[in-house]
């Protein structure tokens, strides 16, 4: 899959995560700054951090009150400050950029926000209808044959919509995720790619299915009368 191709099936924020940070006051009339705790002190509970003196640089903060600063901690040009509060910031990716989405007073509140932003508490659209012109003729015919023969592939099966001359795919075990860490209901995208190639899925269709599966799409319908997505290539007859 070309790395430059933006996934048009992704909507909203992705790769949501929580990071504990400290708000530091350090000089009169200067705005506070925010730093993550140094990894060597990640085990400290909030009560051992809040309202405590610290050292900080451009990357981390290190609590110095009642704590022996680990010898492995190296800081560039450390400054003195005091932690004024502990916050849990929510970070997400959007259009390839990391964005700071908000600060919450507790980890529980931050994870509740992630649950809402990721639609984990309700139902949302997992269906797409896109132009069949995003597929070469032979790839669209491949889908038609799969639908006619009622022959499901490893990770998807096809169905035909006769009145609109469209063909749909139902994807299984989505989202298909990169890397080794997958949820129990998810599959590795490398495994899916290998299985789809074993099923002789045409390359253009394989790429679209992988993009849709990464975005947790469940139904993908290719319709001659549907709108085209500007991010995807078009295959037109000469």
Image (spheres, helix red, strand yellow):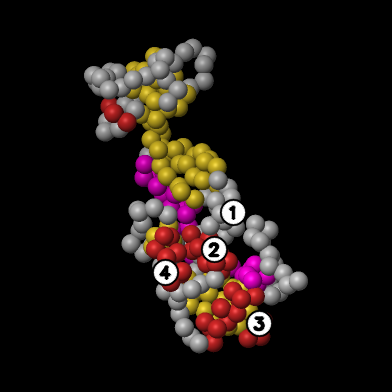
Disc 4 marks which residue?
195
CA gap between label 4 and label 3 equals 28 Å
Disc with the residue nearer the chain's start (4 vs 1): 1
CA gap between label 2 and label 4 equals 13 Å
Q: Which mark is residue 207?
A: 2
Disc with the residue nearer the chain's start (3 vs 2): 3
Disc 1 marks which residue?
5
Q: Residues within 10 Å of mark 4 (few under 14, many from 20)?
A: some
**For the residues bearing labels 1 and 2, Cβ distance under 8 angstroms:** yes
Q: Is residue 60 left or right of residue 3?
A: left
Instruction: Answer whether residue 122 is magenta in the image.
Output: yes
Q: Name the mark nearer the viewer: 1 or 3.
A: 1
Q: Give the magenta-colored segment's residue range.
A: 107-136
Disc 3 marks which residue?
165
CA gap between label 1 and label 3 equals 28 Å
Q: Name the mark nearer the viewer: 4 or 3.
A: 4
Residue at the image position 34 percent from the left and 18 percent from the top? 53
């Amino acid at each position: 899959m070309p790395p430059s191709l933006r996934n048009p099936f992704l909507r909203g924020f992705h790769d949501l995560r929580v990071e504990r940070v400290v708000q530091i006051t350090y000089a009169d009339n200067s705005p506070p700054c925010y730093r993550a705790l140094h990894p060597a002190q990640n085990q400290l509970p909030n009560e051992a951090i809040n309202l405590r003196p610290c050292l900080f640089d451009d990357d981390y903060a290190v609590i110095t009150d009642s704590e022996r600063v680990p010898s492995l901690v190296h800081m560039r040009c450390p400054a003195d400050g005091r932690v004024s509060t502990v916050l849990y910031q929510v970070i997400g990716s959007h259009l390839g950029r990391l964005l700071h989405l908000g600060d919450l007073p507790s980890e529980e509140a931050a994870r509740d926000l992630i649950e809402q932003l990721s639609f984990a508490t309700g139902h949302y659209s997992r269906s797409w209808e896109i132009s069949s012109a995003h597929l070469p003729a032979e790839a669209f015919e491949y889908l038609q044959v799969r639908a006619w023969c009622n022959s499901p592939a490893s990770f998807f099966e096809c169905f035909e919509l006769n009145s609109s001359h469209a063909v749909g795919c139902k994807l299984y075990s989505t989202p298909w995720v990169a890397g080794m860490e997958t949820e129990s209901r998810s599959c590795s995208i490398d495994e899916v790619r290998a299985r789809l190639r074993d099923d002789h899925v045409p390359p253009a269709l394989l790429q679209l299915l992988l993009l849709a599966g990464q975005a947790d799409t469940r139904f993908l319908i290719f319709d001659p009368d549907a709108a085209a997505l500007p991010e995807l290539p078009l295959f037109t007859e000469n």
